[in-house]
Amino acid sequence: MTPVSDKELQQAIVTILRAIGEDPTREGLVGTPGRICRMYKELFRGYDPAQKPRITTFENDSHSTEMVFDAGDFYSMCEHHMMPFFGTYWFAYLPNPKGKILGISKVARVIDYCAAKLQVQERLTRDVVEMLNEALGDEYPPLGMALVMKGTHLCKTMRGARKEGMMTSSFLTGRFKSSAALRSEFLKMVDNKVRM
Ligand code: ZN
């Protein structure tokens, strides 16, 4: 695809302003196309492979297979309406005793990166798990990974369908899929809204 100049993008935003019935030349709006253009570079940095987070991993020296847990917030933009959706994520994984372990602070970075593009919540959930799995390598993959995301979609809530605007997506691999006990242990933390 041919790159789009900042000027072209700003002209497109001026067109949108006119289309919704605004006067793009009025004082409050003069700087708006430029501001949106700069903001998009940050909101959509997930299209730039150079900004992909480097995921540091460590040797699993203690050969632990205990569940490691993380939770936090996420913000993304829905691909159907280019409107924000955002909420809370809960992540857990079981390290491989012979494999690597994740620097847990990297989970939030991976979520931020995968969310910084037009997404649907289901694909975002899967993208994050896949990127984290990949970082841990094929030789001794983690014994399981689980990610649940609960998001509010402004394209729905702002239009009145409040209940429909909330959605939950999940992606489970390995033992989180095969062991009902482990899965319910994880989902209990989700239900109790455990935050680290
Ligand atoms: Zn939408």
Image (cartoon, rainbow, N blue to C red):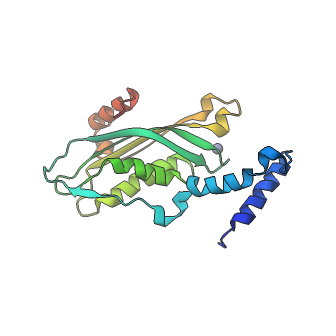
Q: Is residue 139 left or right of residue 39?
A: left
The quadrant of the rendered image in which ligand 1 is seen is top right
Q: Is residue 36 left or right of residue 117?
A: right
Q: Quadrant of residue 190?
A: top left
Residue at the (51%, 50%) spot, across then down: 115
Which quadrant would residue 2 be assigned to in this image? Answer: bottom right
Give coordinates of residue 88: x percent, y percent: 46, 37
Q: What residue is rendered at 69% in x and 68% in y?
A: 5
Q: Residue, x 39% and y 43% (percent of image)?
A: 147
Residue 170: where, in percent of width, then height?
44, 42
Residue reaching furthest to the left: 62
Residues 172 and 193: in front is 193
**Between residues 122 and 101, which one lies in front from this camera angle?**
101
Is 80 placed left or right of 42 in the picture?
Answer: right
Q: Position of residue 156 (x, y in %)?
A: 66, 36
Q: On the image, which quarter does residue 6 sit in?
A: bottom right
| Residue 173 appears in view | no
Judge by depth and name the residue closer to the eye, 166 or 21: 21
Left or right: 99 in relation to 15: left
**Quadrant in which the N terminus appears:** bottom right
